[in-house]
Image (tube, grey):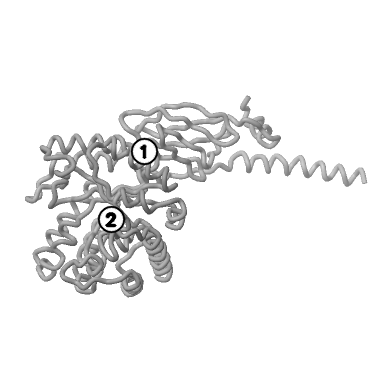
Amino acid sequence: MKKTLRKMKSKLLIIVPIIFLIVLFTSHRASSSPVTRWWRFQSIDTMKFSRDLSREKLNDPAFMATIDAQVKNIADLGATHVAIATPYDEEFYPMLEHWVAAARKYHLNVWFRGNFSGWEGWFNYSKITREQHMSMTKSFILKHPDIFENGDIFTACPECENGGPGDPRQTGDIDGFRQFMIDEYKVTKSAFHSIGKNVASNYDSMNGDVARAVMDHATTAAMDGVVTIDHYVSTPEKLTSDIKAISAESGGSIVLGEFGAPIPDINGDMTDEQQKQWVADAFSKLISTPELIGVNYWTNIGSTTSIWNDNGTARSVSEVIKTAYNPENASGVISDELGDGISNAYIIIGDKTYFTDKNGMFTVPIVGVSESARVEADNYFGTTISVKPSGKQTITLKREKEDIIFKLRKFFLGIK
């Protein structure tokens, strides 16, 4: 028996150090982390051309060059998505294909923000009912699976209050409007599952006042926690305060389906410089608004809010949007004293929180040459650091409690 015990002890003396060495030198690293922007997606809208001219230019080969140039400009500003408002009726499908092809050419996802023309009576189409709309939407998705890509967004009925039975604030049919939104989301979600495409279809935009009337906690939860507003206001301060208020009232995260300036009835006329300053002030506040998860600037060209003039020259506001859509990034790794990355550690910059990946790597957007950040992780002592865009930083956190394995690893490494 004693001899057997001696043999077991001898084996343990060999095995245990080997185990420790394996654990000691097995660390997890990754080359990058996906967080590089302020929002989940950032889009620019093309409605004035992709919808308003969709019949007029349907058989105009020269218009293809216009589409290509506009989408290229949008991609060059750093957008992740281009919002295309071409109607979903079969008449306009060839035009929709041209816009989508241009988006894919310039590596953009698409935010489909069209509708069936009958909902609002576009292009002299006959009006359709809610039931017809849902049936037509399902058929459209199932018939045209190849036009969609993973990461796209599909809005079946943008500003739905403008068509169909009418604005629920006037009709009094709040419950019916809510149920239609929920039912149509179920239809689109199921259809995209059927074609095997990861396309978000719960970003049904509406006027901010409609959102306040319709989007209670139950409805927002049924829409998977997202409220999308097309919102034009007098000041950047009101824009952000409304976002916070609607988020609190609905219990959801907010997407700006449309915003921009100037709208003359709201903002008055603006010079090129005044537009630039208004939008710059707005973005400076939006990036510090954690309730906001996505933005779509309206529009690229053809309106008072345009980024480009009708002759194709860029307005000064284009540089503001390019800066907002391409922030400086700070990256690095958060690890423990042994050099092992800490997953789900959080970096708090202002009002926003970012997380490390499974290997402790992080990439965060920042303003300027550096920003103060609080770094914390469960069961570790937190610290305050300055994050910078140059080089990769290594931040070491100390454990609040150390188990025996951790202490032994520190001992082998000579860490006191």
User: Is residue 127 rendered to the left or right of residue 35?
Assistant: left
Q: Secondary structure at mark 1?
A: loop
* Residue 149, numbered label: none
Q: Check disc 1 and give the amino acid type.
A: Thr
Residue 110 at least partly seen? no
Q: Check disc 2 and give the amino acid type.
A: Leu
Residue 238 at least partly seen? yes
Return the residue nearer the eye: 294 or 15. Answer: 294
Q: Secondary structure at mark 2?
A: loop
Q: Position of residue 99 (x, y in %)?
A: 21, 62
The quarter of the displayed image where residue 27 is located: top right
Mark 2 or 1 closer to N-term? 2
The residue pinned by badge 1 equals 289
User: Is residue 276 rendered to the left or right of residue 294?
Assistant: left
User: Is residue 352 rendered to the left or right of residue 271?
Assistant: right
Q: Position of residue 315 (x, y in %)?
A: 13, 42
> Badge 2: few (under 14), some or many (20 or more) residues near its Cα, within 10 Å?
many
- Quarter holding the C terminus? top right
Total tally of numbered discs in the picture:
2
Q: Give the residue displayed 54% in from the left and 31% down from the top.
A: 397
* As drawn, 118 above or below 341: below
The residue pinned by badge 2 equals 108
* As drawn, 301 above or below 414: below
> Badge 1: few (under 14), some or many (20 or more) residues near its Cα, within 10 Å?
some
Return the residue nearer the eye: 165 or 152. Answer: 165
Q: Give the residue displayed 36% in from the left and 51% down from the top.
A: 213
The quarter of the displayed image where residue 66 is located: bottom left
